[in-house]
Amino acid sequence: MTSQDQPHLARDLWLPSLCFAALGGMTWAVRGCSGFGAMNGCVFAGVTWGAAWWFLSRGPTNRPSRPYDSGWVILALAMGIGFSGSRGWMQWPSFFDGHLQTDTAAGKWVPIPRAYGFLWLFIAGVPWAGLGACALAWCGSHRRTGAAGWCLRVACGLVGAVLARVIFDRLPEVFLPLYQTMQPQYADLVHNPNLRRLVGDNRAAMTHLGLYLGFLVFEAARRDGRAVKLILSVGLVNGLGWAALQNWSWAARFWPGANFNFWRCWESSGGMSIGLAYGLAFYLANRPVSEADRRPSGTPFGHPHPNLERFGAYLGLIFGLGLSVKNGWKGWANLYIGREEHWNGVGWGVVGPLMILSLALVITRIRLRPLPRGTDSDVFPHAYGLIWLVLLVQNLIAQLITGPHSSWNETAFSLYYLLLFLISALIVHHHRSATETT
């Protein structure tokens, strides 16, 4: 590697990877905290990664641009990763301890090889990060996609999901651990509630994997190698990363008797795994390209008009940040006031109308100050302010729902989030400075 290659490696691999990992360490830990969880928590992480990817993809207007720098990236990752949160993973961690739980409340379990834990965390991790990569790939297709192509793309994903679901239901002995020796327990899910949850989690994981593979097959069939690299690298790296982390089940053996929140450590490192996966994808599939190789479509709808791109970026920010603020308020109220669901309704009553008003203002501004197609002007002159808005809002939420500080565990994570914020903020500032001086 020559000395001239070093800055490019830092710009395209090391700095984005470190930024995405730092953001993942904070957002994915928050994902499992009060007020969040499931899809809400994944949207919190997705919009933060989406804003960072979009900002780091921006470069000088007179230099080659990156294929996946569309403003629609923010909404794509918020919704793609958010959708992945519609399933659980709580039945697999016990596999690493050699236990298959049948009724945890009654203390009932049967022995199981630890290999099942590695297998199912890999299966879960691939689409959990990979579905966001599929949506991201749609924001910069190398080949133009018309209405028929979009219908076929969606159909491929749905067919993959349906096939995975049908195969799972037809071959339970393949997808349900120890099914051959535990058929009576699997047949009585009422008295084996953990097996009922295991069946649901495994079925959902396979369905999402089928959806991911269906989308991947479409991009491979149309020979969009850049999209294939993006989707494959994110899915495989995160699948391997999650399997290697083992839900931090090993922590109790390394630090016996330690009174620490190791589950949140797993959540944080799981987010770092996703962040590193996106960092590698950024390097493999999102390096600057010449105008001749530029994607033909700047939005997921195939219209490279700057006004639609502006609308897409602000729609993603309003949706992702609005939902994050509402859930952060709910989580803070649950910690310090109580009556979480009551304050959730209050939050919606305040944040919901503000989101609608914000979207109306954005549409009005775009209509009053439209940009012509093919403009040389910066479509997002306030991009630096927008990324700082995301960093500050999301990190403030993380601090508000971490506590009370009478607990050392909570204080430790509060300081940890502050460190991660500083890392991501410094990278964002460095990128802006480097862009301005280029």
Image: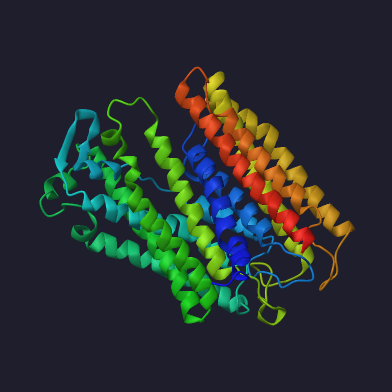
In the rendered image, which quarter is residue 176 located in?
bottom left
For image coordinates 40% across by 63% down, the residue present is 236
Q: Whole-percent x and y of residue 134?
A: 52, 64
**In the depicted structure, whether residue 240 falls above or below residue 256:** below
**In the depicted structure, whether residue 271 falls above or below residue 155:** above
For image coordinates 57% across by 30% down, the residue present is 330
Farthest right residue?
368
Farthest left residue?
181
Picture quarter with the N terminus: bottom right
In the rendered image, which quarter is residue 4 located in?
bottom right
Q: In this image, 376 relative to 141: left or right? A: right
Between residue 63 and residue 388, name the one nearer to us: 63
For image coordinates 64% across by 50% down, the residue present is 427
Q: Whole-percent x and y of residue 399?
A: 59, 30
Q: In this image, 219 relative to 386: left or right? A: left
**In the depicted structure, whether residue 161 falls above or below residue 44:** below
Picture quarter with the C terminus: bottom right
Q: Whole-percent x and y of residue 356?
A: 73, 44
For image coordinates 29% across by 40% down, the residue present is 250
Q: Whole-percent x and y of residue 16?
A: 58, 56
Q: In this image, 375 relative to 166: left or right? A: right
Query: Is residue 344 at least partly visible in the picture?
Result: no
What is the count of numbered marks? 0
Q: How is the image coloured?
A: rainbow
Query: Is residue 260 at least partly visible in the picture?
Result: yes
